[in-house]
Image (cartoon, helix red, strand yellow):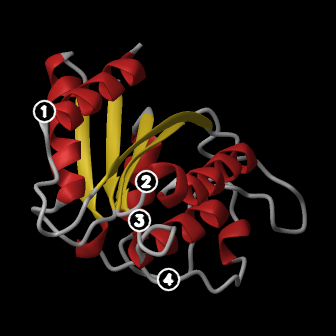
Amino acid sequence: MKFLILMGSPRKNGNTISLVKPFIDEIRRSGDETDIIWLYDKDIKGCIACRHCQKDWSKFGCIHKDDMQFIFDKILLCDKIILATPIYSWSCPSPMKAMLDRLVYGMNKYYGDRKGPSLWKGKSVSIITTCGYDPQKGADLFEESIKRYCKHSKLIYEGMLAERDLGYSEVFISDDKIERARSFAKKLLD
């Protein structure tokens, strides 16, 4: 099985990657593959709703010439997509939001003259997130939006691991959080 982690954090040594590392270790321990794409390192333009992507149902087909074709190709090759992101203002940071907007059109050929297929139908999506509030009030809106996104795109939503950061004066990662990340990986491997 292939896991693709789409990393929405701008910080290479921040809270989100510290939670993702034990998750990746558990996946690799099982013999499955993981790949990670740091979205802040990519050129991802915003969707302009031109519907150019709807002309050819066999490809992504976006008018923008940026790194989204690379991300599209990686998604088609994976089985499970992990959205790893901190929560900023009750949602994901801008590179992930731009990517999600582009994928909903480029992957779902629903918006042209005729309704076409979902090119990623049946793939699994999960969330690993960190937030400053209690997750029930910090990550809940993002999770609900991804559940709706998955239903619309014919994707399988498999759940969320959300961990709270108590502030800059506190150490974020703990043995409990590492164990929950490993357990989340095991759940997705079943």
Question: Marks 2 and 3: CB-CB under 8 Å?
Answer: no
Q: Label 3 near label 1: C-beta < 8 Å?
A: no
- Mark 1 → mark 4, Cα distance in angstroms: 43 Å
Relative horizontal placement of residue 35, taking residue 58 as reference (left or right) = left
Is residue 114 depicted above or below 82 in this figure? below
Q: Amino acid at mark 2?
A: Asp
Q: Name which residue lies at 41% across and 61% down.
A: 133
Q: Nearer the viewer, residue 110 or 169?
A: 169
Mark before the other along the chain sequence, 2 or 3: 3
Density class for disc 3 (Cα within 10 Å; few <14, some 14-19, many ≥20) is many
- Residue under circle 2? 134
State the SS at label 2: loop
> In whole angstroms, how far apart are the C-alphas of marks 1 and 3?
22 Å
Label 2–label 1 contact, CB within 8 A:
no
Mark 4 Cα within 10 Å, few/some/many (few <14, many 20+)? some
Identify the residue under disc 1. Answer: 175
Kindly report the distance in space between the C-alpha atoms of the residues bearing marks 2 and 3: 11 Å
Circles 4 and 2: CB distance less than 8 Å? no
- The answer to whether 135 appears left or right of 163 in the picture is right
If you read the primary sequence from the N terminus, does the residue marked by circle 2 or circle 1 appear first?
2
- Mark 4, residue position: 64
How far apart marks 4 and 2 lie (CA) works out to: 38 Å
Which is nearer the N-term, disc 4 or disc 2? 4
Q: Nearer the viewer, residue 121 or 164?
A: 164
Disc 3, SS: loop
